[in-house]
Image (cartoon, grey):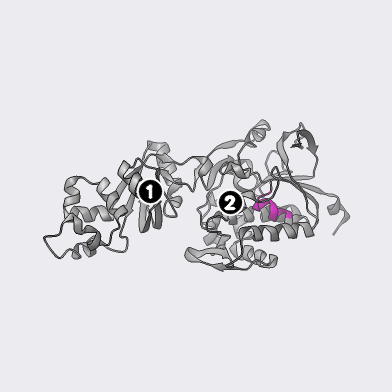
Amino acid sequence: MSETLNQKNIAIIGGGPSAMIAADILSQSFNLTIYEKNSGLGNKFLVAGKGGFNLTNSLSGIELAEKYTPKEFMQDAIIAFDSNALREWYSNLGIETFVGTSGRVFPKKGIKPVEVLNKIKDKLNSQNVKIEYEHEFVGFNENQNVKIIFKGEAKTIVADYYIFALGGASWSITGSDGKWKKYFEEIGVNIIPFESSNCGVNIKWDNHIVENHAGKPLKNISVSLGGTTLKGEAVITDYGLEGNVIYPQIPKVRELLKIQSKAEIVIDFKPDNTFEDLLKKVNSKKTTTKDYGKIFNLKREQLALIKSYSTKEEYLSIELFIKKIKSLSIQVESLRDIEESISTVGGIDTQELNSDFSLKKYPKIFCIGEMVDWDAPTGGFLLQGAFSMGYYVGKSILE
């Protein structure tokens, strides 16, 4: 390790997954300090762990990179540090993983999110990473050095390289509030407005649906939109629908809402059965609407939705009712607010960044994680993207 490298200083502003892995890579060769505005690292990492704690996804290489938008922007980082590499990194921390349903990768059963976070923090501490808590970024000075507020007092940080990992604009309670964007705009960096991603959709339900069926799951369904059909499950909420079959459709819903102010999703309640399969289940001309649930194995909430979006003629006709089972069109009014979205799109325009995630106008400033305008579905891809970007920046600076 050269003396020159030892004299270099790196400041990382933000303390999420991308920041922590960048610190791990770089702290072995540089003097490094993380500046975090909260009292602890990885707040949003812990929030992600309250649901199914997807550490990554079992897809790897180019197949993994295909899940990211824009693909060309993210591909090199994803391939350089894919899910196999991330699982090995976890293993070296003492966190063993396993592949669960739909390719999602989880920590070994019994390992809690806070334990994973503590293992990462322990490694950073062992590598002499300095962490300054309650230090909030409040802009740049005339030389593009970073200004920080600590306990009401302003100070300037001077470093050889700055890595920003300030998050998007969802779950602001974790510190990811998007307030940083005005400071980047002040130095001429183009910021794309934040929008919801991986979120629920707002639907104008009949009162009967809200009062009797909010909170109930719709399992083993498929949802089609714009030529794409996905199988999974959704949950009826008082505002509309959410769930793993809804979230991946959000980019297309967002696009349609912008173009034509409306979007329709099409639900198939029996994706494993054809129209003819379902028609064969009806073996009596005396079948009435009271028999629908038993004949077609439909739950009350499914029947209620179909009835709500059917005319009297459609509901009473066996053939027309089956068509509704296979193709129920529901209009989406809007997306849920950014604040409650799992992730956001928007942030720093990818055109502002070099391939190593440094700003073209300010090459000593790097931007990674959700503060950059990229998107990915749930299922481990969001965390993977953040870790890949952090690793890639670390290796780029080392090289």
Point 46% across, 41% down: residue = 336
Q: Which residues are magenta?
A: 15-23
The residue identified by callout 1 is 214
Label 2 packing within 10 angstroms: few (<14), some (14-19), many (20+): some
Residue 21 in magenta stretch: yes
Label 1 packing within 10 angstroms: few (<14), some (14-19), many (20+): some
Q: Amino acid under label 1? A: Ala
SS of the residue under disc 2: helix
SS of the residue under disc 1: loop
The residue identified by callout 2 is 47
Q: Main secondary structure of the magenta part?
A: helix
Q: From the viewer's perspective, is residue 281 above or below residue 148?
A: below
Quadrant where the image shows the C terminus: bottom right
Q: CA distance from mark 1 to mark 2?
A: 24 Å
Residue 87 in magenta stretch: no
Q: Is residue 271 visible?
A: yes
Q: Amino acid under label 2? A: Val
319 or 256, which lies in front?
319
Point 30% across, 57% down: residue = 299
